[in-house]
Amino acid sequence: MNTPGLAWRYLWSRPLSAVLNVLLLALGLASITFLLLVANQVERAFNRDLAGIDVVVGAKGSPMQLILSGVLHLDVPPGNVPLSAVNALKTNPLVAEVIPISLGDNFQGYRIVGTSLAYPQLYAATLAQGSMWDAPMQVVLGATVARTLGLGLGQTFAGSHGLAGGGHAHGDSAYTVVGVLAPVGGVLDRLILTDTASVWKVHEDYTAEDAQDRAAMEEEREVTMALVRYRTPLAAISFPRWVNASTEMQAAAPALEVTRLLHMLGLGTDVLRAFAGLLLLTAGLGVFIALWSAVRERRGDLALLRMLGVPPARIALLLLAEALWLGVLASAAGLLLGQLFMAALVYFLGLGSALLTGGLQWPAALAVVPTLALAVSLTAALLPAWGAYRSDVLQLLQTR
C-alpha cells in the first residue's frame, strides 16, 4: 500500500472540507509569517542604518524624533543647533568623530542632506559613477534616487524648501550631479548628499539682502544635528549626560531609542500574534473534526484494509499522513500569503524605499512556519489515529 498516495486521495475525497481546513491553517500561518518578516526587516534596517553611530546630538525635543529624522530620515527634526556648539563637540576627549547633518530641502520628495564626506564613509559606500563632491552645490545621488528620477552625471536641478515635495523651489541655486553611489541597501540609497556649505549657500542666497546681512548669517550658521562616534565605549556613560546637562542640545542614544520603538511596535504585534494563535487553534480543531469524521465514514474501507492484512499501525499512519499533507499544503499557502501581505504593506504605505524592502525575503526565522504547521496537523490527528489503531475488524464490519 502506497501510504502517502492513498492519504492524498483520501484527503481530496472531501474537497470542500480539505480546502476549508487548509485555508484556516494557512491564514494563521500567514499571520505568523507576516510578523516574522516585519520583525526581521525592521531589525535589519535598524542595524544597517545605525551601524557606527554611537549618539546623535541635536536640538532639545524628542530623542526618538532625533533618531528617526537624522539617522533613518523618516521624520522631521526638532530644530537646528548652532554650528559653534557642534564644533565644540570635536574638542571633547571622549569624541572620535563628529559628522554634521543639515536638512531643510528636498528634490521631488528625496531629502537633500548637507554633510561631510565622512557620512558616506560611515556606511562604506562606494561610487557607481562619477566622483564625490569637492565644492559647494555639487551632489552625489543615492542609488534609488538616481534610478527613480533618471538623473545622471552633469545634470542640474533646483531643490525645494521642506522635507517633502511641493515646497517653494530655490530656482536661483542649482545643484550639479557629480556622482552616483552604488546600492548599499540602506538609508543612503534614498538621499541626495552634498557639502554642508551647499545648504548654507542656498538659504543665504535666498534670504540675504546685502553683504552685511550675509555676514551676520555666516556668523550664526546652524546645522540640524551631529552624528557622533565615541573614542572609547566608556563615553556612553558620561558623554550624553554632559551634553544634556551642560549644553542647549540633547544627546540621543540610537540603541536606547530603537529599543523603545521596538517595544512600542511589540505592543501592536502582540494583538496580531494572539489573532494568529486563535486561527491556528481553530484550524487545529477543524483538522481534528475532519479526521475524526473521516474515521467514522471510512469504516468499510478500514475494515477491508484490515482484512487484507494491513496492520493497525499502518492504518494509524494513513491518518497521520493525511494530516501531514494538510500541514504541507497549509505551510506553502501560509508562506505565500505572508509574503503577499508583506508586499502589500510595503506598496500601500510607501515603505519600499524607507524602512522595509519589497520582494521575497526568506529569513531563517521562517523555518518555524512549516514546523508549526506540521505540529498543529499531527497533534490534531493523534486522537483520530489512535482511534483507528484501536478499532476492531469485527466491530468495523458490524457498524459498516
Image (cartoon, rainbow, N blue to C red):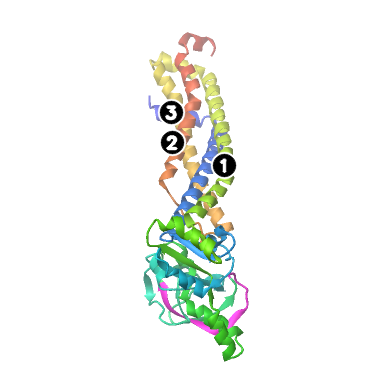
Is the residue marked by circle 2 packed among few (<14), some (14-19), or many (20+) residues within 10 Å?
few
Q: Position of residue 343 (x, y in %)?
A: 52, 54
Would you place residue 266 above or below residue 10 in this image?
Answer: below
Circles 3 and 1, Cβ within 8 Å, touching? The answer is: no
Residue plotted at (51% across, 20% down): 295
In which image quadrant can residue 20 be found?
top right
210 magenta-colored: no
Residue plotted at (50% across, 44% down): 33
What whole-number distance in Å separates the C-alpha atoms at marks 3 and 1?
A: 33 Å
Whether residue 251 is visible to the viewer of this picture, yes or no, is: yes
Most extreme residue toward the front is 246
Q: Magenta span: helix, strand or loop, mainly?
A: strand
Would you place residue 189 above or below residue 27 in this image?
Answer: below
Q: What numbered label is drawn on residue 270?
A: 1
Residue plotted at (56% across, 32% down): 281
- Viewer-proximal residue among 215 and 297: 215
Q: Which residue is mark 3?
A: 321
In the structure shown, which secondary structural element does the residue marked by tag 1 occupy? helix
Part of the protein shown in magenta:
163-180
Q: Of discs 1 and 2, which sits in the foreground?
A: 1
Q: What numbered label is drawn on residue 371?
A: 2
Would you place residue 133 above or below residue 14 in this image?
Answer: below
What whole-number distance in Å separates the C-alpha atoms at marks 3 and 2?
A: 15 Å
Q: Of discs 3 and 2, which sits in the foreground?
A: 2
Is the residue marked by circle 3 packed among few (<14), some (14-19), or many (20+) residues within 10 Å?
many
What whole-number distance in Å separates the C-alpha atoms at marks 1 and 2?
A: 21 Å
